[in-house]
Amino acid sequence: MDKMLLMIVFGALAMASLVQDVTAQTAHMVGDNMGWIIPNGASAYTDWAAGKTFRVGDTLVFNFRTNNHDVQRVQKTSFDECNSQNAIGSPIMTGPANVTLDTAGDHYYICTFGTHCRNGQKLAITVSSSTGTPGANPPTSSAAGPSGSFPGGSAPPPPSSSTTVFASFMLSISAIALAIFV
């Protein structure tokens, strides 16, 4: 009987661990160490996004200084023309800004300050609805701190989901059960 209970506890522990690994989301630091600024080249954010996998539930972290930049999601025509006439939602004026990817498809972001967009401060990504392995690149710790400072600031916490919380709960319960019955 004890061996059977032990096998059940270890099975629950293994399942909780697998569920947590499969459902974890990724926080993508836009531009990595560069942050969300006017880049040195027009393709900087295109190059940054290349090779990364973005999924529904992931978070984009736009690392910028408040009053110097903003983030506005727009439709493709506005992205191409660098205007906010076809804005989706309101601009995010306070940095750093966390944007949760809540729909699959193409997403377009620009900075609406002056000529920032025309000078390359814009990002186009494709978001997948598939679940499974989190995004290709793990988050970096180059996010701005609350004061808006750049590299060296503290990173915002990664996003959480109810499934991840449930998996952590199951992991804890399994460990307690193991301690009680063994």
Image: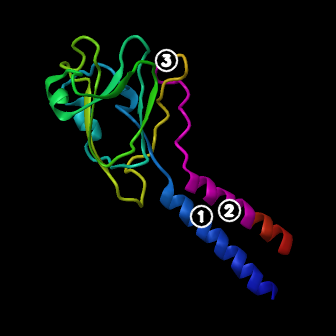
Frontmost of labels 2 and 3 is 2
Q: Earlier in the sequence, mark 3 or mark 1?
A: 1
Does the magenta segment cover residue 157? Answer: yes
**What is the span of residues highlighted in magenta in the rendered image?**
150-174
Q: Which residue is mark 2?
A: 171
Q: Residue at x 14, y 29 (%)?
A: 80
73 or 49, nearer to the observer: 73
52 or 102, nearer to the observer: 102
How would you rate the neighbour count of disc 1 (Cα within 10 Å): few for under 14, some for 14-19, many for 20 or more?
some
Q: Are marks 2 and 3 in contact (CB under 8 Å)?
A: no
In the picture, the disc for residue 149 is: 3
Q: Are marks 2 and 1 in contact (CB under 8 Å)?
A: yes
- Helix, strand or loop at label 2? It is helix
Q: Which residue is mark 1?
A: 17
Q: CA distance from mark 3 to mark 1?
A: 36 Å
Q: Residue at x 68, y 62 (%)?
A: 171
- Helix, strand or loop at label 1? It is helix
Q: Earlier in the sequence, mark 2 or mark 1?
A: 1
Give the amino acid at mark 1.
Answer: Ser
User: Viewed as shown, does residue 80 lie left or right of 121?
Assistant: left
Residue 85 in percent (x, y) is at 21, 22
